[in-house]
Amino acid sequence: MAIQSPDSQYFSDSQTQTEMELLATIVQTDVAYPWNPAQLESESYLADIDQEFSLFDSFSDSDIAEKSQVLFAQLEQVWLATALQKSLGEKFARVPQDFLARIAKSVQNATVKYQSLADQMVECVLDILPQWDEEDLQVLARPLAYAMREADSSGVEVMMETRRPWAQLSEIEQARVGLAVARYAISQLEISDLFFDG
């Protein structure tokens, strides 16, 4: 006679328990799905389901077109933010990924909200650097914004010269790098806007 190990006994008990739970779930279902749609009972079941999900009856063609445009605009924003976050992650590998993700999400709102490049940059990092006053960030952003107008990426390269890890940067260096990342993100967004508009 073979002796069962405790493991095989546990497996047998858990398998039996799982089978019983599955059977109970199947039996407890109030309305069974009609597997044969040709049966008379299935016609009323399917009519009830159609009544529950008749969304198109409540919207006109213009409502559907309008709502689909809103949906596609939101999808485009999500796609742009994702693509921008990937681009930032490749360019600024030393900067924490959550920092880059938050800049990527805030850059679209900042460019709509403000005309000034410095204001846009500050808006992108304001929530990420809560220890900084907006006015102090403006002081750091203005020269960076004006210097980068002529040579778009040279200012970013200068800001990223240091080889020290992110945690070893001072608060002011982190703020400057954050503003440089924001400026780069804004320029990338402008490029993608030209691509989608053109």
Image (tube, rainbow, N blue to C red):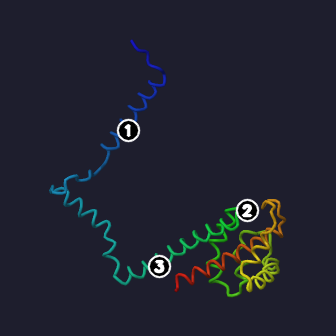
Does 127 sit left or right of 195 as displayed? right
Residue 130, placed above or below residue 67: above
Instruction: Classify mark 2: helix, strand or loop.
Output: loop
Classify mark 1: helix, strand or loop: helix
Asked whether 136 or 140 is in front, the reply is 140
Q: Quadrant of residue 103?
A: bottom right
**Could you tell me how far apart the alpha carbons at marks 3 and 2 are, in whole angstroms?**
36 Å
Q: Which mark is residue 70?
A: 3
Residue farthest to the top, as pictured: 1
Q: Is 17 above or below relative to 154?
A: above
State the separation of the CA atoms marked 3 and 1: 44 Å
The picture places residue 194, in percent across and down from the top left corner, at 57, 84
Q: Quadrant of residue 4?
A: top left
For mark 1, what is the residue?
21
Q: From the image, state whether disc 1 or disc 2 is nearer to you.
A: 2
Residue 94: assigned label: 2
**Quadrant (top left, top right, bottom left, bottom right) of the N terminus:** top left
Count up the numbered dots.
3
Picture residue at 29% right of the left edge, 50% below the top: 30
